[in-house]
Image (cartoon, coloured by chain):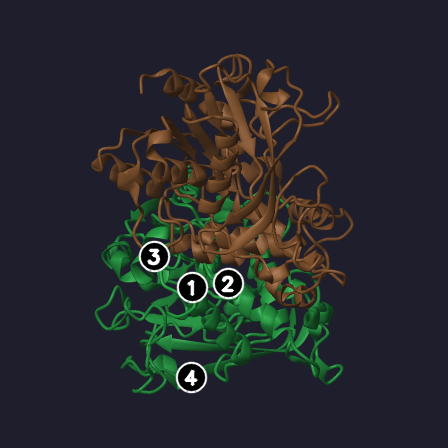
Chain colours: A brown, B green
Amino acid sequence: MTAACMQAYDGLVQKNSFALPSYTTVGGKTIRDVRVGWESYGRLNQEKDNVILVPHYFSANSHAAGRYRQDDPVPGYWDSIIGPGKPLDTDRYCIISIDSLVNLNSRDGITITTGPSSIDPDTGKPYGLRFPVVTISDFVRIQKALLDSLGIKRLAAVAGVSMGALQSYEWAAAYPDRVKKVIAVNGTPSQRPFAICNLESWITPIKADANWNNGDYYGGPEPVKGVALALFNVIVAAQHPEGIANNFQYQWANPDQDPLAALENDFLVNQAFRAGGLARATTTTDANEMLYMTRANQLFVAGTSGSSVDPALKKIKAKTLVIQYRSDLLFPAGVARDQVNALQKNGTCAEFVEIDSGGGHLAGVTEIAKAGDTIRRFLMSPQ
Amino acid sequence: MTAACMQAYDGLVQKNSFALPSYTTVGGKTIRDVRVGWESYGRLNQEKDNVILVPHYFSANSHAAGRYRQDDPVPGYWDSIIGPGKPLDTDRYCIISIDSLVNLNSRDGITITTGPSSIDPDTGKPYGLRFPVVTISDFVRIQKALLDSLGIKRLAAVAGVSMGALQSYEWAAAYPDRVKKVIAVNGTPSQRPFAICNLESWITPIKADANWNNGDYYGGPEPVKGVALALFNVIVAAQHPEGIANNFQYQWANPDQDPLAALENDFLVNQAFRAGGLARATTTTDANEMLYMTRANQLFVAGTSGSSVDPALKKIKAKTLVIQYRSDLLFPAGVARDQVNALQKNGTCAEFVEIDSGGGHLAGVTEIAKAGDTIRRFLMSPQ
């Protein structure tokens, strides 16, 4: 037990580390010396039954709430709903979040993860493409190992947005007796084969960058351009025409350089998003890790560990709240609603709530407070 | 007048060529020796007032209907609604379609277009990035020049899907007295700034391909990988989870190579779409032309020729039918509906029809027959 889980939450957080000497993946490969980071907000009760697990989204890490230092410019991504008196109430619950494997922030100096850029103990060099393919099931199994080590047997809830929603479904399907409630925001139990090609389109610039060199670039020139543009694609995919029009009008990147005058001239929105991608490509994100994270999501079907069978939705016992933002173009609301109907047919107690927003997929992060009352009511409801 | 416009339509079509010795772009640059191809289906009447113009979509050319030879495997893309007795009735109307500038099919041996891969008469070499940026307004101005040369003063209708819809709006806004009716399928008068970054994400693999070399690759190694992956992105962007699930289940590219076993192994849907992109990249599409076509669409606001002012929707007099497929993720139906409301507020007679389909943006091509009765009724209605 670390000190983190024993203290009342005051908004200051720390990254903890969890290590497994050896882990065997869903695909049957063994990884030695697996390490992931984790954070917690709120105090674990004596019964250890007040934990809400918050798995993170595709490009995030376990920094879901709070600040490492008082003067951090921004808090964790769901800070608006995690804290004392907030919907995920740290006076009542102990919120835990865990860095994924193959995390997109492996180079930020804070995230703790294991992936293709990690040093292979057998060779003393980065794994590269020798790192085994991992799945969202693997992320969840590592999470379970950590919770086991803390003596936490049953979760009050698992709540996540986007890939965090996928992991929430995976928890409920893989460990139906260990999850009381699921809150899935902007995600579904499966969206293959759409997810397969849609995710693949994000990483096309990495595949087109000769420096990627089939994953063998450590110690040489790295595919920074490809990674930057892939991250640009991730940013764009989370937008919607309404929300983006509020943030960017028709503006040029440089007031003197009309995009009508020359192909080299650009628009402000592209420049801004590209700068966001480039900043992360140079300081945070490894190309191979982005490809492995993409593959983990492509393989996802809740409860079936990446196999080819249909979603094992019938296993889900947890009371389920599905929150879908109207303008999400990655997980369209209509598709999510159909999948809730399928859950209900299987006997799962599932509720579908659509939130009105023009903010696109990203609104599940930036506008999560809009769902605050719904989440609070759901957590208070009988199981 | 070519023979094409004088004959009853029998399903066999030919490509015609139109040349302008000199053309000055919206951006104020002059292009010498502009050539575009065009096709027609049906007979021009004596009054020359029975023309329906069908501008084409982003990756298409003017082959909207019919076959060049009886044994062509597939006809033009809207063949299901263009022909004798069909909604765009060739017994009544003369349908005309015109290849765009900077067309994505410049190398297919059929399309006639002028763009950065064309030979600059001043240098005897391909223009490359010296080719002026052109806009959708330029596409429309060239179309008008061709129609003027045929003595066609007023269009019974302009009808198009996707970029074809954008051009239809542009016609109605730029030449309000020359367009009686507009049929806009899966498109809007403007979707900036979303369109700007969304279109940019398609071409990220070209920008990441070192062979692109800032557009200077003619005579050297070409960015075939980047173009193939960019075309993959275009294919993916036109999908929706429902429709794609009907066409592709969870299948591997190679039954012996589980994508869970190695990162190199892939899924069937990716392989199929990538093969589609690669085929066109090697035989049809020039990288710079794809970038210029992207820019033309990014600059689009109906009636304002790429400037920064708001859409000049008030200029539109044409009776307007907006058809939007429910599952379109590029032009979400709700956004299109809002823009129809804006048209109506301006006094335009505009009707919004949503077609139920899970086929995504692409359904405006593959399932256009579903809108057939609506189109027929609209064309028969009084102006």
Q: Amino acid at mark 3?
A: Ser
- Separation (CA) of disc 1 from disc 3: 10 Å
Q: Residues within 10 Å of mark 4 (few under 14, many from 20)?
A: few
Q: What residue is disc 4 on?
A: B2
Which chain does the residue under circle 1 lie in?
B
User: Which mark, by number, is residue B262?
Assistant: 2
* Front residue of A253 and B312: A253
Disc 4 versus disc 3: nearer the observer: 3
- Separation (CA) of disc 1 from disc 4: 57 Å
Q: What residue is disc 3 on?
A: A308
Where disc 4 sits, the SS reads loop
The answer to whether the residue labelled 4 contacts the one labelled 2, judged by CB atoms less than 8 Å apart, is no
Q: Position of residue A121 (x, y in %)?
A: 66, 54
Q: Amino acid at mark 1?
A: Asp
- Separation (CA) of disc 1 from disc 2: 7 Å
* Front residue of B132 and A297: A297
Both marks 4 and 3 on one chain: no
Q: Residues within 10 Å of mark 2 (few under 14, many from 20)?
A: some
Quadrant of the image containing the N terminus of chain B = bottom left
Both marks 1 and 2 on one chain: yes
Q: Amino acid at mark 2?
A: Ala
Where disc 3 sits, the SS reads loop
Q: Earlier in the sequence, mark 1 or mark 4?
A: 4
User: Which mark, by number, is residue B258?
Assistant: 1
Disc 4 versus disc 2: nearer the observer: 2
